[in-house]
Amino acid sequence: MVDNSKTRVVVGMSGGVDSSVSALLLKQQGYDVVGVFMKNWDDTDDSGVCTATEDYEDVKKVADKIGIPYYSINFEKEYWHRVFEYFLDEYKKGRTPNPDVMCNSQIKFKSFLEFAMDLDADYIAMGHYAKTVKDANGVTHMMRPKDGNKDQTYFLSQLSQEQISKVIFPLANLTKPQVREIALANGLATAKKKDSTGICFIGERNFRKFLSEFLPAKSGKMVTPDGKVVGEHAGLMYYTIGQRQGLGLGSTKESTDPWFVVGKDLKKNELIVEQGYDSPLLYASRLKASDMSFFTGKPDHDFEMHCTAKFRYRQCDIGVTVKYHAADNTADVYFDEPARAVTPGQALVLYKGEECLGGGNIDAAYQEEKQLQLV
């Protein structure tokens, strides 16, 4: 049996069941485990409750139960500058950002990793559902976990080789129900705690109200692709490509089909909408991605490959051909079949079978040569 007692793993504990069980399993495997709670946002919620205080209480209960030391660290400043300012800037550009991807690469696996190394950690761990394997050359590869329903490789897609080589994923071969069973069997305080949703660290709150606290909303016209005014929008930042809910538009003489957001005209401050799920303006044949990141390292040459991709979380993989450009670290990605509601600002993530190759940020979607959505 391997002696892990001299290997220190610092576990990022959120106060949820997944990171609690990660800490427990590592302790059971004999590692020198230290728990750390990250506070990254002043998160008094809409009802005046500071959820971070409650979460830290749960971390303390779990850490005491499994017998590990614990600390709390504040990354509010780093989160604001590295994640939240980017988040707001993307909305100003009319895009729909994915803060969770940035939060992982900049906070959980950067600021937290650096802090853990100061605690003499050999590795870090959290409650993510993902898996890594090391090849014969010592290169770490990111793989899909056992629980495909909870697969979080999408959100980890922009980590570097240096980052993933320092991570252990204790939940790699477990399903969520198994994780809850382990928590219950071991009497962990978080066993029945519901999963958190909402923006990374910011949590569940009225998103429109929250965003309006930081960005001034400017209302404007809702128009059809041919320029007919059909309503008024509350501010372009509140809408995303393919959105159906919250438009407040009824059926017309011509059609009873629901309305969808198909584009934004930033110069005119107009939201472009059209009736029908299958509006041709929602279907792209290719996209352009920037800031490409590959787990095995940045390629030093152009290449072309066929693989699969996701451009939103929980989406089924779709076949794509990737043309990578080393000079500016961008990629042109061509879909095997037209893809619906490809959204600038979101993450593109590439897969080859069970392996997650990496990803990038979607800059633009095209129908052949015509740019869609953002005018």
Image (cartoon, rainbow, N blue to C red):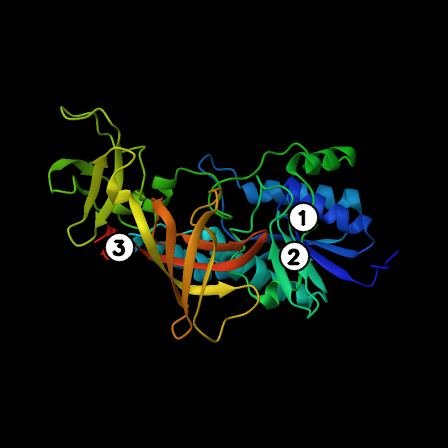
Q: Is residue 26 visible?
A: yes
Contact check, label 2 and label 1, Cβ < 8 Å: yes
Q: Which label's residue is closer to the chain start, 1 or 3?
A: 1
x, y percentage for residue 103?
50, 55
Secondary-structure class at tag 2: strand
Q: Nearer the viewer, mark 2 or mark 3?
A: 3
Question: Which three-letter amino acid code belongs to the residue tagged 3?
Answer: Glu
Say whether residue 116 is left or right of residue 281.
right
Q: Which residue is mark 3?
A: 368
Q: Amino acid at mark 1?
A: Ala
What is the CA distance from the residue labelled 1 to the residue labelled 3?
Answer: 40 Å
- Please give the name of the residue rendered at 16% of the width and 25% of the height, measured from the top-left corner: 252
The residue carrying mark 1 is 172
Q: Residue at x 76, y 35 (%)?
A: 187
Which label belongs to residue 132?
2
Q: Is residue 324 above or below residue 42?
A: below
Q: Disc 1 or disc 3, which is closer to the eye?
A: 3
Q: Residue at x 37, y 56 (%)?
A: 334
Q: Is residue 57 visible?
A: no
Q: Earlier in the sequence, mark 2 or mark 3?
A: 2
Label 2 – label 1 distance at C-alpha: 8 Å
- Label 1 crowd (10 A; few <14 / some 14-19 / many >=20): many
Q: Split into 4 quadrants, where in the image is the C terminus?
A: bottom left
Kindly indicate the quadrant of the structure image that contains residue 188: top right
